Amino acid sequence: MNAGPLLPGRDDDPDRLYTITGGRSRAPSVAFDLVTLIVAERQPAPGMQSEHVRILRMCEAPTAVVEVAAELQLPVSVVKILLGDLLEAGAVTARHPRFAPNKARLPDLDTLKQVLHGLQRL
């Protein structure tokens, strides 16, 4: 009986995922966000795992973790493990998003009052 084709981005073969990650279920010590940008720092080397090669080629320009997972059609958790391997080897760098502190996001109250008074005078 045919189970039908797998949906894009969905791989239900646990043996394949186990093989890709070397049996690991967590990324090495580095936590990647979905929006962390990955940049390749070197070219693929002969004998490298095919997924690592694809990641390095894909990340010649900064690429978000979620985009890498979508392109490889692998779960994000698996991609994070692969990226952790590459990061530890110095093959990629990770640029985490920076968020300004809450105070820096809002203008000063006096400035807002001055703008309001200026607009009222128009």
Image (tube, rainbow, N blue to C red):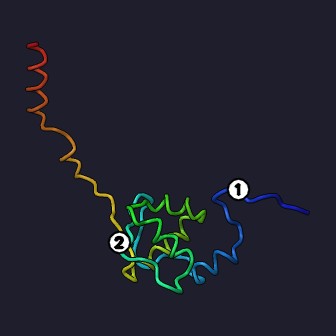
Image quadrant assignment for residue 114? top left
- Label 2 or label 1, whichever comes before in sequence order: 1
Instruction: Bin the neighbour count of mark 1 within 10 Å (Cα to Cα): few under 14, some 14-19, many 20 and up.
Output: few
* Left-right relation of 92 to 47: left
Instruction: Bin the neighbour count of mark 2 within 10 Å (Cα to Cα): few under 14, some 14-19, many 20 and up.
Output: many
Q: Residue 48: x percent and y percent?
A: 52, 83
Tag 2 residue: 93
Element under disc 2? strand
CA distance for labels 2 and 1: 31 Å
Q: Residue furthest right?
A: 1
Q: Residue 79: x percent and y percent?
A: 52, 69
Residue at 60 percent of width and 78 percent of height: 20
Amino acid type indicated by mark 1: Leu
* Left-right relation of 72 to 83: right
Residue at 69 percent of width and 74 percent of height: 14
Question: Relative to 5, is 48 above or below?
Answer: below
Q: Residue 102: x percent and y percent?
A: 23, 48
Q: Which of the pair 105/63 is nearer the observer?
A: 63
Amino acid type indicated by mark 2: Thr
Image quadrant assignment for residue 23? bottom right
